[in-house]
Structure formats: C-alpha cells, structure tokens
Amino acid sequence: MNAASVALALALSQAPGAGARLAPAPIQLWQVAWTRPLVPPGLLEYKPREPGGPAIDPQRGNVVVGARDGILRALSDKGKVLWELKTGGPFDAAPRVEGDTVYAPCDDGKLYAVEAGTGKVRWSYDAQEPLGSTPVLAKGLVYVTSQQDTLFALDAATGAFKWHHRREGKEGFTIHGASGAAVAGGVAYAGYSDGFVAALDAATGAVKWERRVAPAGDFLDVDSTPQVDEGRVYVTAFSGAVYGLEAETGNAAWETKLPGPTRLSLLQGRLVAVTTTRVVALSPRDGKVYWNAPLDGMVGGDPVMAAGAVVVPAGTGLRWLDPATGRLVKIFDPGTGVTASPAVRAGRAYVISNAGELVALDLR
C-alpha cells in the first residue's frame, strides 16, 4: 500500500462521518404531503427497483416520472394523475422537462419527446439500444447515452439524428448503467464502460480527446455523469478512483484512490462521491478527502441537495447528511428503499420508492 492509499485509509477510518449515527433528537427536515401508488406489485417480483426517477415541470409545477411498468406519468402538485403514456419498456433514468416538452429515455430504445401539458408524443427517436441517462439539452440539441456505450445527439425540435459517438466497451461483464452526458463550452463529455472519458465537439461529435482514466481491475466502468466546473471535468472509475481532469486536454490534474465509486455530484463547492459502501466528500481543487460516511444499502442515484443536506438514495431509503461533516442527520425510508434521485424544487421534493409509490415531501 503506497503513502496516498494509507492516508486515504486513515481518513476513511477517522473522518467525522465515519461510523456516523443518527442525531439523538428528532430533526424536522420534511413533512409528507401525499403518497400516490403508481405501480402495483407484480407476481413473484423480488426486491423491485425504480431507477427512473422523477423530474419537475417548472412551468406548470407538475412532476413527471417513468416507472418500471413502462408508463410515463405526469402528476399535479396535489398528486392527481394528469396524463399517462404507455411505452415499450421500463425507465432507467429520469426524464428532462425543457419548456413545454418532456424528453424521456426508455429501455425500449426510444427517446420520447412529449407535450408536457397533454402527454401527446411529438416525436420519438429509436436508438435501438436501451437508453440509460437523463437527457441534456444545449443549443437546440438533446444528448442522451445508451447502456451500450453510445452517446446520441439529436435535434431537440424534430428528433432528427445529428451524430453519435460509440466505444465498443470492455469484453466481459460490466456494471449496469450509463454515464450521462455533460455539455459545457461547446463540448460534450461522457464516460464509458471501458474506463475511458471522451470530450467531443457538441455540434459535430468530432473527438477532441479520449482518455482512459480507470485503474486496472475487473470493472473499469465510468458510470458517473461528468461534473464540469472552472476548466475541470470530474469523473469516477469503478475500478478504484475519482479524477479531476483538465477539460481542455483530458490530462489528470489529480487522482484520489477510492474503491468502487459509481456516482458523483458537485454540491456546494464539494465533490460528493458514492461508492458501494461509503459517501465521500472531496475537494475539487486537489481531491483531498473532507469527510466520509458509511452507506447502508444498495447504491442508488446521484446525491442532491435538499433542505440544507446532502441527500443520497440507497437501498435503505434517502440518507440525509450534514454537508460540512458527513454526519447522518436523518433517513427517509418508504419501506422498500429508494434507487432514483429525488427531484427538488421550491421547498418540495418528489421521491419514487422501489415499490413504485411517488411521495411528495414538503421540506422544512
């Protein structure tokens, strides 16, 4: 074990979040406004998961969510179902609502563009590969990645194909999931299951650089959505590291060894990485570990901020952590755990449980 690994191991064992326990007194972070069952339990269904997740329609105040039953739904802020769209497969990623259009990626291989007010399909693009990331829009294009290592760029108004970038991936098994795309400064960034990160011209798909970042290991997957800020691109590799890359060249500015990282978010000036066993906060400047906290339960979606806390979806529910110390503040457990990230806006958070129930939380 080298000096850096020893230092990280000591940080993980001694940092304030290590072995964190719930606060002794109740802390009021939310109140349940309503619960709406969406998906009835299936026969012989064992430990269902709902990775799709909700998205908020900022113009109408509605919430849109795709579930494992293959139905995309819009609900009012009171929990009334406004419309439903039956598709050909379950949803592995949350939709994106932009203006009056919902962009919904589906396991049936199609990206659906749907009228936000009515649920009418404007267009659908058949990628012929299960789509696994929340779409991103920039300068009239919509970007979405598949679970087979392809990044697609489409015309957001018509669904017309513009370009794609594909890597063949690593031979053998990979981690289920897909890195979402990030677009900044006219460049699109994405990660791939062979341990590479690519920077592409956002308009044409021309390759600016491709870099392998993953250490040697059985699973090289870069499944976290790249986080881009101030000339740096931040990614994880499941084989054991978090990276800060120079956006212009892809060269590593720093590398922090961390076993099994799968999710990464930039929250309040800190990188929050989720591994198979821990939640770790790092400095974007140099990768220094600020704090860590144990993760109890299966890894879920990306961490988000809500009610002044870092909220991490997990098999045991939503874990609310103090952003300064990593201390576990509270857990919201709907009874079956949470896989998808919650959607948060204006004092309200929407959560879909693994049992297929949508829960509205009024934040305190």
Image: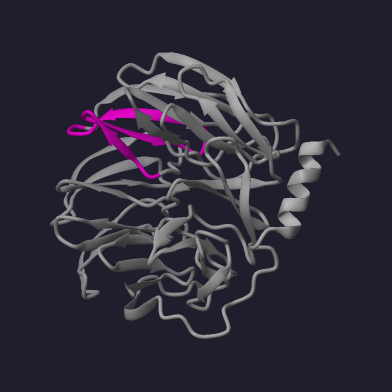
Q: Residue furthest right?
A: 1
Q: Residue at x 49, y 85 (%)?
A: 26
Question: Viewer-proximal residue, 272 or 44?
Answer: 272
Q: Quadrant of residue 128?
A: top left
Q: Is residue 189 magenta?
A: no
Q: Is residue 278 above or below residue 100?
A: below
Q: Is residue 11 above or below residue 46?
A: above
Q: Position of residue 217 (x, y in %)?
A: 75, 35
Whether residue 73 is visible, yes or no, is: no
Q: Residue furthest bottom?
A: 25
Q: Position of residue 14 (x, y in %)?
A: 73, 59
Q: Which residues are magenta?
A: 134-158
Q: As drawn, is 153 to the left or to the right of 208?
A: left
Image quarter of the C terminus: bottom left
Q: Is residue 207 above or below residue 37?
A: above
Q: As drawn, is 332 to the left or to the right of 2?
A: left
Q: Residue at x 43, y 34 (%)?
A: 228
Question: Viewer-proximal residue, 315 or 30?
Answer: 30
